[in-house]
Image: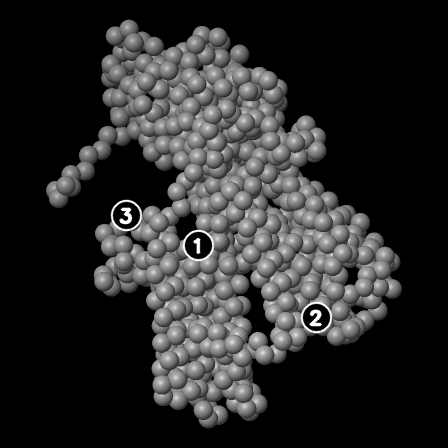
């Protein structure tokens, strides 16, 4: 069974087309990279897949069930770390995580235990600061903790590693690998192609406006293999990405 | 002084205003209608000032009346800025301006110049200028000294408003600051009544009091307009001294921002009053209600406005009861008392999500119906306002300016409960149809949209004036004998609220993306 199945997804903002007839399938138990240039519709797609936005057309299935913004039961099985982190600045980290834990149906004792463990593991132990006082990296860690606190079966991460220090990134990667080993699925967007290449089994690449241009297995790259496309052989994800999305170079003589 | 960059900032402020307006044709129309109305009001205020000047001269007490008018205006402007947030909106925060190559002094000048350019201050200035023209037209006033005095008075009024607003902001950030503020407001409310009674008993105190008042800016301005030679210059000097002193305080306050204090350390606190109150709404709503309570309990504006609700209603009830004739006395009390049902929370209820920032996005990722957010927010505000009704009723029963019988008490409670439901029902629509991104950290300033202001200020004015009008045109409707009409209004209002809530939840689901765009600053 696919963890995520998207059929002919379309999203318009007024007359502006953000995602065009996007269809993709994500197998259960893998780490799936969702790539595209800036403004190509990655975050809009994640918004539609997680209930933040209503698709203009098309269908989304998560874990075999049709998903809409009102699918509360399904949402309990999903974890989301949005691009705009969605934190409540006046709250302390533990208050925010406890709120999220309770909303996702954890009982009080479990919530407290998990919040304490997450705060310690992610080194968010400065309890004199509210979320608004946290640095960007710390805020990102809190958003990650909020996404995983209820042990979801499908995890959506929008640019999860940006602004986080190498130790934090290493820890998160370790958790994510364990996560998929347990048969759970991670849907990840990132502009750091090397990281995606090392972490993900499959990748989808989109261009403006949210149009799928390539989807495939990239595990061969880890074993010195190549990906064939358009009659060319690609030894890494970056050249393939640039080929698909269009390389460009503009010379500014004053710079 | 870098006038060029300051000029650019001022241009930018108006470009931003226009950019917000031009997104919709309707908004452009509203913008122009608003400005035509503003010009109209400026004209009315100027004429009012001229009229006041003429009356002051004809009564033979030109100086006392002019000083009185300027004093009342000065105080009213101060109250309006501090309580309602008019005229002190920070268009650009200092932090934002630091990005540009502008010196600290220039940043300060630009910010305060933009503050002074708020339409609210135009109205104040129009009335003051009208007074000068009126006094000059019928005889004793000096036009040039008058203009200088009024301009200085106007600037000192703005600086005073900024100083008071900053001081109150500091106060509410302190632990127990809200309580101190409450005490100050109560004292301010009681002192005029006590002073009036004291003057009646000891009229000899009037002369020294007037001597002290001569050293205040409004009296100084009146002297500069009406007195000859040295006395006029002394009046100007008084205003200048105040202006310099207030400016120094303002600069000192701005240079030393409050230090963020560690509100919590050591062990994590899990269960607090927010959770306990939230639990009253059942397990499904409890976390959301607790979240709303916690969120707003940390909002400076809320921490100022909510505790002020009781003293403000008490102040209005007592003052309105005294200015009314015997027939209208109870009607005025009824109108003012009913405000307790919404005055503490409605300015937040009309823009429930405005202060959420990016956090608003989080709610739609939670495994709950999105409408639960709107519903629980509204319940929270309803509960907070409802709590004030019994407290206010007991206080009024004990200290009422008129003798109250059981029918009157029933009417008062009925009116307050009806106001509670009606205003919170209407506020739901303002939240959905006129959301606006607000500044969570600000203690003052008017962040509301036009719809929000119409509900908030329109509600206050309705409850202030409609009973008074009814007392004249249909006295039986607001007499104690009409208790059986007013009391059933409460359940009817509750029905209105719940029907509104049900429909609003449906609208919220479909409008949530638009609201998200506004709250995150993208629309």
**x, y percentage for residue B501?**
68, 44
The residue that appears at 81% across and 57% down in the rendered structure is B409
**Chain of the residue where label 3 is placed in the rendered structure:** B
The disc, 3 or 2, on the residue closer to the chain's N-terminal end is: 3
How many marks are shown on the rendered structure? 3
The disc, 3 or 1, on the residue closer to the chain's N-terminal end is: 3
Q: Quadrant of the C terminus of chain A?
A: top left
For residue B322, the mark is 2
Q: Is residue A205 visible?
A: no
Q: Quadrant of residue A45?
A: top left
Mark 1 crowdedness (10 Å alpha carbons): few <14, some 14-19, many ≥20? some
**x, y percentage for residue B346?**
62, 51
Mark 1 lies on residue: B166
**x, y percentage for residue B306?**
60, 49
The residue that appears at 57% across and 17% down in the rendered structure is A110
- As measured in the structure, the alpha-carbon distance from the residue carrying label 3 to the one carrying label 2 is 53 Å
**B295 and A164: which one is in front?**
B295
Q: Is residue A35 above or below residue B24?
A: above
Compared across the picture, whether B100 is left or right of B483 comes to left
For residue A191, the mark is none
Q: Secondary structure at mark 3?
A: loop
Mark 3 lies on residue: B99
Q: Secondary structure at mark 2?
A: helix
Q: Secondary structure at mark 1?
A: helix
**Chain of the residue where label 1 is placed in the rendered structure:** B
Of badges 3 and 2, nearer the viewer stands 2
**B202 and A75: which one is in front?**
B202
Compared across the picture, whether A174 is left or right of A226 comes to right
């Amino acid at each position: 069974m696919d963890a995520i199945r998207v059929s002919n997804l379309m999203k318009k903002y007024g007359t502006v087309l953000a995602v065009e007839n996007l269809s993709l399938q994500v197998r259960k138990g893998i780490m799936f990279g969702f790539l595209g240039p800036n403004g190509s519709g990655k975050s809009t797609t994640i918004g539609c897949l997680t209930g933040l936005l209503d698709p203009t057309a098309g269908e989304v299935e998560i874990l075999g069930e049709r998903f809409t913004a009102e699918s509360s039961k399904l949402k309990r099985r999903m974890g989301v770390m949005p691009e705009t982190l969605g934190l409540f600045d006046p709250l302390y980290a533990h208050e925010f995580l406890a709120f999220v834990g309770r909303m996702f149906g954890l009982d009080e004792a479990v919530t407290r235990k998990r919040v304490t463990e997450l705060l310690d593991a992610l080194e968010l132990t400065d309890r004199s600061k509210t979320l608004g006082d946290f640095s960007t990296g710390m805020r990102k860690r809190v958003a990650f903790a909020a996404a995983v606190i209820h042990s979801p079966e499908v995890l959506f991460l929008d640019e999860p590693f940006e602004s986080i220090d190498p130790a934090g990134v290493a820890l998160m990667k370790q958790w994510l690998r364990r996560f998929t080993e347990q048969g759970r699925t991670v849907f990840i967007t990132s502009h750091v192609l090397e990281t995606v290449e090392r972490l993900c089994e499959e990748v989808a690449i989109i261009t403006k406006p949210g149009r799928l241009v390539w989807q495939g297995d990239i595990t061969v790259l880890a074993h010195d293999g190549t990906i064939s496309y358009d009659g060319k052989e690609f030894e890494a994800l970056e050249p393939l990405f640039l080929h698909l999305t269009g390389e460009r170079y503009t010379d500014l003589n004053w710079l | 002084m870098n006038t060029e960059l300051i000029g650019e900032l001022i241009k930018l402020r108006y470009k931003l205003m226009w950019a917000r307006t031009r997104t919709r044709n309707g908004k452009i129309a509203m913008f122009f209608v608003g400005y035509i109305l503003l010009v109209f009001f400026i004209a009315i205020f100027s004429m009012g000032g001229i009229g006041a000047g003429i009356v002051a001269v004809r009564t033979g007490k030109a100086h006392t009346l002019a000083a009185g008018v300027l004093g009342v205006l000065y105080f009213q402007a101060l109250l309006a800025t501090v309580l309602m947030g008019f005229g002190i909106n920070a268009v650009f925060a200092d932090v934002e301006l630091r990005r540009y190559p502008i010196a600290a002094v220039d940043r300060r000048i630009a910010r305060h110049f933009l503050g002074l350019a708020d339409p609210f201050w135009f109205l104040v200035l129009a009335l003051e200028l009208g007074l000068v023209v009126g006094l000059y037209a019928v005889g004793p006033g000096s036009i040039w000294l008058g203009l200088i005095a009024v301009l200085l008075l106007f600037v000192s009024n703005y600086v005073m408003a900024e100083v008071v607003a900053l001081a109150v902001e500091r106060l509410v950030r302190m632990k127990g600051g809200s309580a101190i503020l409450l005490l100050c407001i109560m004292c301010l409310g009681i002192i005029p009544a006590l002073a009036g009674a004291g003057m009646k008993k000891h009229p000899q105190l009037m002369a020294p009091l007037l001597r002290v008042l001569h050293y205040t800016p409004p009296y100084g301005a009146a002297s500069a307009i009406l007195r000859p030679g040295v006395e006029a210059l002394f009046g100007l000097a008084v205003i200048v001294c105040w202006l310099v002193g207030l400016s120094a305080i303002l600069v000192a306050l701005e240079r030393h921002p409050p230090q963020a204090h560690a509100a919590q350390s050591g062990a994590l606190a899990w269960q607090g009053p927010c959770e306990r109150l939230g639990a009253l709404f059942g397990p499904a709503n409890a976390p959301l209600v607790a979240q709303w309570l916690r969120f707003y309990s940390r909002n400076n504006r809320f921490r100022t406005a909510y505790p002020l609700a009781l003293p403000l209603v008490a102040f209005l009830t007592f003052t309105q009861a005294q200015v009314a004739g015997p027939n209208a006395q109870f009607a005025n009390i009824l109108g003012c008392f009913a405000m307790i049902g919404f005055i503490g929370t409605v300015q937040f209820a009309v823009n429930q999500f405005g202060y959420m920032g990016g956090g608003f996005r989080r709610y739609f990722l939670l495994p709950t119906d999105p409408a639960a957010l709107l519903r629980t927010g509204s319940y929270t505000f309803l509960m907070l306002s409802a709590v004030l009704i019994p407290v206010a009723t007991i206080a009024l029963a004990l200290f009422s300016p008129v003798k109250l019988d059981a029918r009157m008490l029933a009417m008062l409670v009925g009116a307050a409960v009806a106001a509670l439901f009606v205003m919170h029902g209407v506020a739901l629509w303002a939240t959905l149809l006129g959301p606006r991104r607000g500044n969570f950290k600000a203690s003052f300033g008017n962040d509301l949209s036009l719809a929000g202001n119409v509900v908030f200020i329109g509600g206050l004015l309705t409850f202030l004036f409609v009973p008074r009008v009814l007392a004249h045109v249909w006295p039986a409707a607001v007499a104690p004998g009409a208790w059986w009409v007013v009391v059933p209004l409460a359940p009817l209002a509750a029905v209105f609220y719940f029907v509104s809530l049900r429909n609003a939840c449906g609208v919220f689901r479909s409008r949530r993306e638009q609201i998200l765009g506004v709250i995150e600053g993208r629309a």
